Each structure stands twice: as structure tokens, then as C-alpha cells.
Image (cartoon, rainbow, N blue to C red):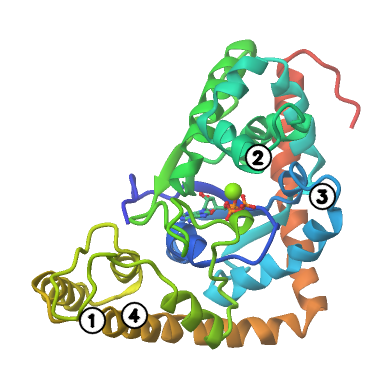
Amino acid sequence: MNIPTPERQTILTGDRPTGALHLGHYVGSLRQRVTLQEQHRQFILVADLQGLTDNGSNPQKVADNILEVLADYLSVGIDPFKTTICLQSSLPALAELTMLYMNIVTVSRVQRNPTVKNEIAQKGFASSIPAGFLVYPISQAADITAFKAGLVPVGDDQLPMIEQTNEIVHKMNGLLPAPTLVPCKALLSEVSRLPGVDGNAKMSKSLGNAVALSASPDAIAQAVSAMYTDPSHLRVSDPGKVEGNMVFIYLDAFHDDAEYVAELKTRYRQGGLGDRQCKNVLNDRLQTLLAPIRERRAELMQDKGYLMSVLRAGTEKAREQTQQTLVEVKRGLGLPVFY
Ligand code: ATP
Ligand code: MG
């Protein structure tokens, strides 16, 4: 992991509560967050409002997943004493900042955002794009800037959001008597886009190609067994291709012994190593990684009162910071503030 500066920074990351978190989140951001919380001032936003932007008619799905995501956080080692975990919909300053920023971003600029474009196509919105969905990058800019975060650990699908956030920072600061908003940098992990188990370019909750952190041992084994390998590797003795082979992509992402994986690759390329054997190695690794997470998660889900209290406390702490930024921006724009 590559942390640009050693000094303590403010960090904001988050996830949409649209389903249980998965292996893509683990390598893309969760394991980084566990390290970052030791050294930095870290906020994690459960982005329920953003989850609603493409689930407007299914609010129950988003509501039900809030505690699931929280349980995922705590079960991988995010510590609520070190990281402030908060709920987007209970931080009204974020919605207000979104309203203010929407006036300095054009519709064509949001339509040009490649991730938004891609998601619109994937979700089949055609000409019926919810207005909230189209402007979600603006609301993400509000989230990041409200916390004055300088560092944003994300997967690479989020890079266009960071770029757009910095444009807003620049424009808004130009309207204020003194620079108030802080530009941010993306922090990419070594595996910034884990492909889905179906071979799709990104494992995603919405694409049905994910292995959840809470997956049962059988579900893990099944996902590994169905993974796409090298279609021309028909017999064990045939030389096989490692590039584009899902099993090796996952071994690179999850196995902690890089030398051993390199040795497997050499044997696979030469011929003589079967897909079954490689899949067994991957399955063992994933089972070992996920078993303690699953256990801890099941325990946490027994105590929803505790989970709720963690979220409430974090949200109250975050409210102070976000409200303060909002007031600075409003005053800077010359608006009277009556609260
Ligand atoms: P949805 O399909 O509902 O958008 P998602 O699986 O894309 O869900 P998000 O909550 O949108 O998950 O993403 C949260 C964070 O996790 C983002 O920083 C995103 O870049 C990162 N992330 C999500 N999927 C992956 C992945 N497959 N590889 C690496 N990072 C990922
Ligand atoms: Mg997403």
C-alpha cells in the first residue's frame, strides 16, 4: 500500500448499503482501512442516500442493509474507537452541500462521467435516469468535502468521482472569500478492481457476481469451482495460460505467499498442474480468510442494539464536522445562517 505522506490525514471512504460487502471490497478498500485507522483520522460513511439513487422504489433493501454493512466493517477489524462510522441520511449538511454544489456543475459534465455512463448502461436506465442518480457524483463531492478529507481510499471505478470533486473544490473555493474546501487524493490499493467470479471486469453487489464476506463455506467452494480458467487447458499435462485466468487473478489478490503462487504459475505454464489443484489452493485460502470474519459477523448480528449504538455515536461525531463545513460555505457565499 502506498500512503503518500506519513503525517496524519483526514480520510473519508464509504459504501452503499445495497447488499453485503464482498471480496472486492476486502481487497479494494476494507483491508486498507484497517491499516489506515492506526495512523489517520478516518471516517467511514454508510451511504444510504446514495444507495437510494438507484433503488428509489425499494427503500427497504437499503434500510435492511445498513446494519449488514456495519457488521461487515466490524468483523474485518474496523474499530469504532479508531474510525468514525456514520450514516449519510442523518447528516443533513451533506444534502445541503449537494444542493449548493449542483448549481456550479453542468448536466453535461455529470453525463460525461465515465463511471456514471457505464452504470447507466448496466442498469438499463435508458432515458428514465432518476435525477438523484445522475447527480450522485455531486453528492459524493459533498460527502468528501464536508469532512475536509484529503485522502479517499477507493476502487478505481471511483477515480472520475475524485476528479469531479476536485473541480467542485476549485470552483467553490473561487467563490468564497478564502479557500475553505480541501482538495483530495484517491488512494488506490494494489488490487483496485477485483473482477467478478463470472469474469466481469468488476465484482459488484448489483451484478450478482460477488462472493460476500459472509458467504457460507459451500458458497465459497461453489464460486471457486465455477471460475473460468484457461479454456485451452484441457488435460492436466497441457501447458496453461495464467493471464486472464480467474483462479490466478484471485490467488494474486488473496494468497499471502507470493513465492508459492509464482511457483504454481510456473508449473501451470509448463503443463502438469491441473485446474482442480489450483482451485483447491484458492478455496483453502478463501475459507481460511473468511471463516473468522463470518463467525464474528454472526455474533455481531445477534446484537443489533450494539450495532445501532455504534452507528449513532459515530453519526453524532460526524455531524459536528460536517455542519461546521456547511456553515463556513454558506457564510462564505454571503448567506445568513440562522442555526
Ligand atoms: P453497487 O453495485 O451497489 O454499486 P459495489 O459492489 O460497487 O456496489 P460500492 O458500495 O459501490 O460497491 O463501493 C464501495 C467501495 O468499494 C468503492 O470505493 C469501490 O470502488 C470499492 N469496490 C467495489 N467493488 C470493488 C471491486 N470489485 N474491486 C475493488 N474495489 C471495489
Ligand atoms: Mg458501486
Of the numbered discs 2 and 1, the one sitting upstream in the chain is 2
Q: Tell me the distance, in whole angstroms, between the alpha carbons under discs 1 and 4.
A: 9 Å
Q: Give the Cα distance between marks 1 and 3.
A: 52 Å
Question: What amino acid is labelled 2 in the image?
Answer: Asp
Q: Position of residue 251 (x, y in %)?
A: 31, 71
Residue 143: assigned label: 2
Instruction: Please give the name of the residue rendered at 69% of the width and 43% of the height, measured from the top-left corner.
Output: 321
Closer to the N terminus: mark 2 or mark 3? 3
Residue beneath disc 3: 90
Give the numbered dot on residue 274.
1
* Residue 311 spot, x, y in % from top left: 75, 64
**Residue on which disc 4 sits:** 279
Q: Is mark 4 within 8 Å of ligand 1?
A: no
The CA span between labels 2 and 1 is 48 Å
- Res. 4 image quadrant: top left
Amino acid type shown at disc 1: Gly
Closer mark to the observer between disc 3 and disc 4: 4
